[in-house]
Amino acid sequence: MRARAFHLFGIRFRDATKRDLVAAVAQAVTDRRRCVIADYNLHFLYLCCHLPEMREFNSSADCTHIDGLSLVLLGRLFGLPLRSDHRTTWLDLLPLLAEEATRRQWRIFYLGSRPGVAEKGARALRARYPGLLISARDGYFDTNRFSKDNQGVLAEIRRYAPDILLVGMGMPRQETWILQNREEIAAHAIFTSGALMDYVAGEVPAPPRWLGPLGLEWLYRLLSEPARLWRRYLVEPWLIFIYMASRYLRKGHPSTKSPHD
């Protein structure tokens, strides 16, 4: 991938645009290899500060891209050459990825959301992109690696043989599931996709796209789902600030460009 690699407060990520991400999918499909693509926002940073498995997932992912304008601004503050188009949300990536998947006949499997929501979202995508090949199932199953449920999910994915797997089970559940099952997942490009299908299915209001460049999507989401998101948006940023300040005082400058890129 041509996108440059950086580290910020111990998190490895790339300055990938949405076109870079689609190109990464095309390369993975062509090479017939697994490529795990994760998204990096403040909640991801918070979880990496507290959960070893999230840090392990970040280290093992092939590409972690920025999903949050706050991370672009934070990177700039510490001297990283980041632009607004280095921030890609799923609502911005989905149209380009779905169009390319339809054109190239890539098969997509979505795993996540509540029972009924995943298939509702898949139907909406088929209607929006005629010819799109997509299958879906909910994320309500026993994710223990050796459970009958989990083995059944892996078998279902294997039977469908997707080029792209979207795992939308929320952080850190989706990351932990990918980390534990990566070698058994029969897909080429494996994405973490959070609440994507909830938005597509109309279960959760999607933020207007003009809020993105203003850095206000978080406020729209908070007002839409205050009971679920109040801690993420009103408490976690302060805890991250305390963590970053203490790390800066101990280790100095928090950002670097990867020496291997």
Image: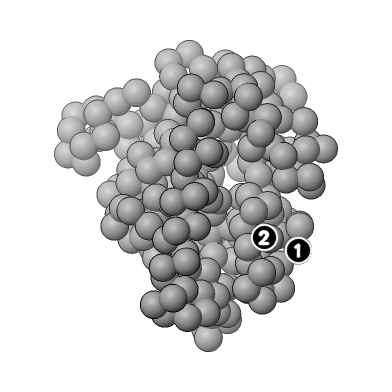
Position in image of residue 116 (x %, y %)? 48, 13
Residue type at mark 1: give it. Arg
Q: Is residue 65 above or below residue 237?
A: below
Foreground residue, 124 or 238? 238
Left or right? Give the position of 174 relative to 217: left
| Residue where numbered disc 2 is placed | 72
Q: Quadrant of the C terminus?
A: bottom right
Asked if one can make out residue 33 in the rendered structure from this viewpoint, the answer is no
Foreground residue, 43 or 152? 43
Position in image of residue 169 (x %, y %)? 42, 33
- Residue at x 47%, y 66% (from the top left corner): 245
- Residue at x 47%, y 41% (from the top left corner): 235
Residue type at mark 2: give it. Val
Asked if one can make out residue 64 in the rendered structure from this viewpoint, the answer is yes
Q: Which mark is residue 213?
A: none
Dot 1 or dot 2, earlier in sequence = 2
| Residue where numbered disc 1 is placed | 83
Q: Quadrant of the N terminus?
A: bottom right
Label 1–label 2 contact, CB within 8 A: yes
Left or right? Give the position of 216 relative to 176: right
Quarter of image, res 92 = top right
- 10 Å neighbourhood of mark 2: few (<14), some, or many (≥20)? many
Q: Secondary structure at mark 2?
A: helix
Q: CA distance from mark 1 to mark 2?
A: 7 Å
